[in-house]
Image (cartoon, helix red, strand yellow):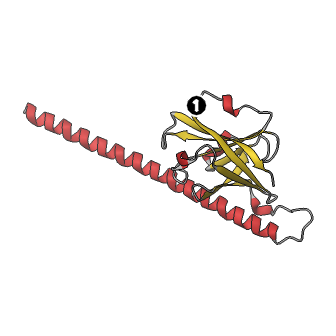
Amino acid sequence: MAHNWKRLVASALGVALVVTGLFIGARTGMQMLRQQNADRSQDRAWQHFTGAVQGQDGGTITVPADAGNIYLKLTVPRLGKDGVAVDGDWNSLHDASMVHYHDSPAPGAQGNVLLAFHRETHWMDINQLKAGDQVQLQTRDLLLHTYQVDFVRTVHPSDVTLLRPTAGNDLTMITCDPPWQDYNRMLFRAHLVTAG
């Protein structure tokens, strides 16, 4: 009788673990799907925006009413990837995969431009970006700013030293490390090479 009881408990535990795993997997899958949909939506908005701006006849650039909160486009030539950022705060990362921190300077301006993004799933290989590589930020006025990576550093989330304002023309990109976790932050510090 005791043997049957142990088997029943082991079976119930096994079923509970499988159900928990399915729940976690479904939740993660839904988050990834939501993030990918947000990425596609932001990319479509950027394409629409730049198409509308490029069709204007010089003079002052008028931002289309449906451009939303899109702010810039990041291009990483080494990885052959790009992504569109909104202008916001850290809470904006709940709805967008990439955010220009609104209290930091605009690309090309003096100070420390802060750009935070999720690694999953588009930027899983961002750890291949190294010192000496270049990244480009295209702003809503279609100016292209090129930055060169000075160093990559992994820090504890409480270490905000590199997020502070600087006297240079710097860019700090922030993402989580390792992927799918929130244990550390991977920071990429770069300096402005050419302003648009």
The part of the image, by quadrant, that contains residue 166 is top right
Q: Residue furthest right?
A: 59
In this image, 52 relative to 37: left or right? right
Residue 188 shows in this picture: no
The local crowd at label 1, few if under 14, some if 14 to 19, many if 20 or more residues have their Cα within 10 Å, is few
In the rendered view, would you say 189 is above or below 126?
A: above
Q: What x and y, as percent, mark residue 101? A: 72, 42
Q: Which residue sits furthest front?
A: 132
Q: Is residue 104 above or below residue 139?
A: above
| Residue 164 position (above or below residue 90) | above
- The residue at the point 73 percent across, 48 percent down is 87
Residue 36 point in image, percent of width and height: 55, 57
The image quarter in which residue 20 lies:
top left
Element on which disc 1 rests:
loop
Q: Is residue 160 visible?
A: yes
Total count of labels: 1
Percent coordinates x, y for residue 69 in the rendering: 74, 53
Residue lying at 82% horizontally and 44% vertically, measured from the top left:
109
Camera-side residue of 29 and 59? 59
Residue 98 vs residue 5, the one in the foreground: 98
**Can you say which quadrant of the picture contains the C terminus?**
bottom right
Q: Which residue is mark 1?
A: 157
- Comparing 180 with 154, the one in front is 154
**Quarter holding residue 24:** top left
- Where, quadrant-wise, is the N terminus in this rendering? top left
**Residue at image coords 70%, 51%:** 86
Question: Vertically, is 132 above or below 156?
Answer: below
Please state the horizontal and vertical placement of residue 55, each as a whole percent of the image: 82, 72
Mark 1 residue type: Pro
Residue in the picture at 65% in, 29% down: 160
